[in-house]
Image (cartoon, grey):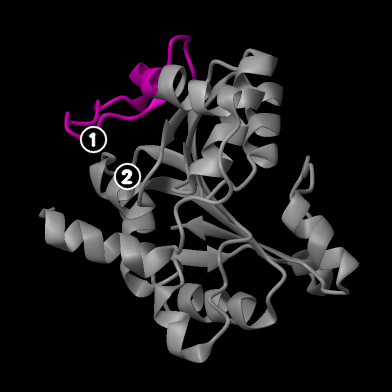
Amino acid sequence: MSEPRRARATEAFFGRRKGKPLRERQATHLETILPALKLDLAEPAPADLSKLFPAPVTRIRLEIGFGGGEHLVHRASEDSSTGFIGVEPFINSMAKLLGQIEARGVGNVRLYDDDAAQVLDWLPAASVDQIDLLYPDPWPKRKHWKRRFVSKVNLDRFARVLKPGGLFCFASDIESYVNWTLIHCRDHAAFEWTAERAADWLTPFAGWPSTRYEAKAQREGRKSAYLTFRRS
């Protein structure tokens, strides 16, 4: 992908890159821990993604926009047999996760601090078991809906990298984005919504640890939806 196209893709899916100034320890983590965990997209991806991790893993799970990292570090800590790839362009969030990784001694995580579309284009076909997109930026104004990460183009990317039977898990408290995602996945031939009962979309994923975004939604009186789609 050329640099101009990469810049446009980045602009389309997320906003600011940095918030308040980092604490000294957080800045140190970015300088010392992130380089060891960061994917090198300048090199071809290994055909077997388990080679990205120091210990053997049997599954690969990608989380796009991990925010404060609560969910990612929880899942990685409870399941050492899965290799996790986390993508987050917001520097403050990346720094926060790195602190948790160091504190917990988590070794089955690899990271990328820019546009997730770049990672999706880098990954081999049929190499990922699950993709998590949890409380993504909703871009609530209609004129900005084109910036939502769920799109025909990105669902094509998901379909390419997911293994047959692989899962795409989506959570949001924004009704218009939930409906948007249901419609886009309904219209995409590669994905099937797994819900079997009316209440399924309100039931958190198994082992769900909750996140600060979910807590904020609950405080403000919004319900969260949890959608799971299977790659055919």
Question: In this view of the protein, which residue sits in the foreground, 83 or 191?
Answer: 83
Residue 9, image x, y percentages: 28, 63
Would residue 189 appear left or right of 207 to someone viewing this image?
left
Quarter holding the C terminus? Answer: bottom left
**Residue 150 appearing in the image:** yes
Q: Residues within 10 Å of mark 2 (few under 14, many from 20)?
A: many
**Is residue 77 located in the magenta-colored stretch of the structure?**
no
Give the residue pinned by disc 1: 41
- Amino acid type at circle 1 is Leu
Who comes first in sequence, dot 2 or dot 1?
1
Farthest bottom residue?
142
Question: In this view of the protein, which residue sits in the foreground, 204 or 77?
Answer: 77
Residue 44, image x, y percentages: 17, 31
Residue 49, image x, y percentages: 35, 26
Farthest left residue?
2
Magenta stretch, overall SS: loop
State yes or no: discs 2 and 1 in contact (Cβ < 8 Å). Answer: yes
Residue at the image point whose x is 83% and y is 70% from the top: 199
Would residue 220 appear left or right of 90 to someone viewing this image?
right
The residues colored magenta run: 35-57
**Above or below for 176 versus 35:** below
Residue at the image point whose x is 40% and y is 72% from the top: 151
Give the residue pinned by disc 2: 119
**Above or below for 83 versus 211:** above
Q: Which mark is residue 152?
A: none
Residue at the image point whose x is 53% and y is 37% from the top: 94
For label 2, the SS is helix
Corner quadrant of residue 2: bottom left
Would residue 98 appear left or right of 39 to someone viewing this image?
right
